[in-house]
Image (spheres, coloured by chain):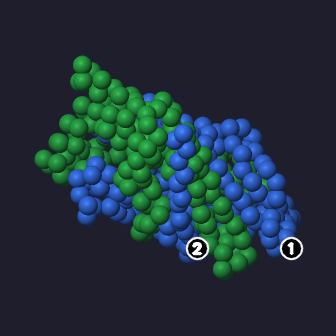
Chain colours: A blue, B green
Amino acid sequence: MTTTEHVGRNGVDTATLFATIDAVRADTDLAKFQFRATNRWVAGTHNRSTIHDFHGAKQEMTHREPFTFDADHPPVLVGADNGPTPVEFLLHALAACLTAGIANVAAARGVTLTEVSSTVTGDIDLLGILGLSDEVRNGYQQLRVGFTLRGDDPEKLRSVVEQSRRRSAVFDVLTNGVPVSIDVDAG
Amino acid sequence: MTTTEHVGRNGVDTATLFATIDAVRADTDLAKFQFRATNRWVAGTHNRSTIHDFHGAKQEMTHREPFTFDADHPPVLVGADNGPTPVEFLLHALAACLTAGIANVAAARGVTLTEVSSTVTGDIDLLGILGLSDEVRNGYQQLRVGFTLRGDDPEKLRSVVEQSRRRSAVFDVLTNGVPVSIDVDAG
């Protein structure tokens, strides 16, 4: 049955996905979300974030549990390696966003996936953040994503990746930037 | 003793920090790093990244263990909530990078910290990624960071935050963007 096939294709509940899009089309305020993370310094370059509550669909919501993540520098960067560096989390965010989009787009199009794996690499010259050059930027010079997809026809798979890229929130933020304001309570 | 005070201030080994900066100044190739994440799709919007190896200081290195992170969508966004959303990891990365910088800058300046905590919020209108508007961007419209610092003189603490911002890799990437290339093996 078509319905049965589409509910659960690639693990995506396409019926609910389409119903959600219809609901948002009818009331666009449902699409206004605010995500949040709180962070606390532990010692040295080691600190920990908690991600739990967010606002969306006109209400306060929570993830099913508070997710906590440690970040640190490795010894070569004078840290204790209690977690990845902050910049490595950007690579995870990019891979995760594009991959979730691939799964959704493929399901919506009826494209079967058997594998989606990727490697993201980012080149960075630390002369910037170490304050040793004013010509080298602080952040990554370039990010590269290499995807391996298996399942349906290769041309269809490539088209799914392209559509995911066109609608990826993280890809947009990383390639186009976003305004960031910082307030300090140093009372 | 001055030396003892400075080694370990705020948990930062300032002697090693300064020695590292001197070593890099003498051989700038030591500053060329490449960070990496691998990701594998699990089901639906659920996928998992591993962060382990990287290149830096002219050699292949690894974190002391492979760090793995799940990402997913919450039920309201048709996922199973097996982890934060990809865009929430961007908030963690920003808080973590600025906080590590604050600890390092404060230690280098001999500024004492007793607390550094922060909340990062990001506003996003999902009309973009849902394909319901071509005028709404896919990513965050704006990020706000609120820091609370305690310890030394408030003016010194504010100045430390400002210097951390000026040398933050994640702040640079998020505010200025970075080129991203995507290759697909759909063989």
Residue that badge 1 annotates: A26
Q: Is residue B17 above or below residue A124?
A: above
Q: Quadrant of residue B128?
A: bottom right
Residue A24 falls left or right of residue A182: right
Q: Quadrant of the N terminus of chain A?
A: bottom right
Q: Chain of mark 1?
A: A
Circle 2 crowding by C-alpha within 10 Å: few under 14, some 14–19, many from 20: some
Look at 60% across and 37% down and name the residue there: A68
Q: Chain of mark 2?
A: A
Q: Quadrant of the C terminus of chain A?
A: top right
User: Would residue A125 be seen by someone viewing this image from the given angle?
Assistant: yes
Q: Secondary structure at mark 1?
A: helix
Residue A180 falls left or right of residue B60: right
**Residue mark closest to the camera, 1 vs 2:** 1
Labels 1 and 2 in the same subunit: yes
Residue B30 falls left or right of residue B112: left
Frontmost residue, B57 versus B80 = B57
Three-letter code for the amino acid on which mark 2 is drawn: Arg
Q: Is residue B141 above or below residue B102?
A: below
Give the percent coordinates (x, y) of residue B126. Answer: 70, 66
User: Would residue B78 be seen by someone viewing this image from the given angle?
Assistant: no
Give the percent coordinates (x, y) of residue A149. Answer: 54, 62
Frontmost residue, A94 versus A79 = A79
Q: Is residue B105 above or below residue B175?
A: above
Look at 82% across and 54% down and name the residue there: A59
Q: Secondary structure at mark 2?
A: helix
Residue that badge 2 annotates: A166
Give the percent coordinates (x, y) of residue B9. Answer: 35, 28
Look at 80% across and 64% down and name the residue there: A30
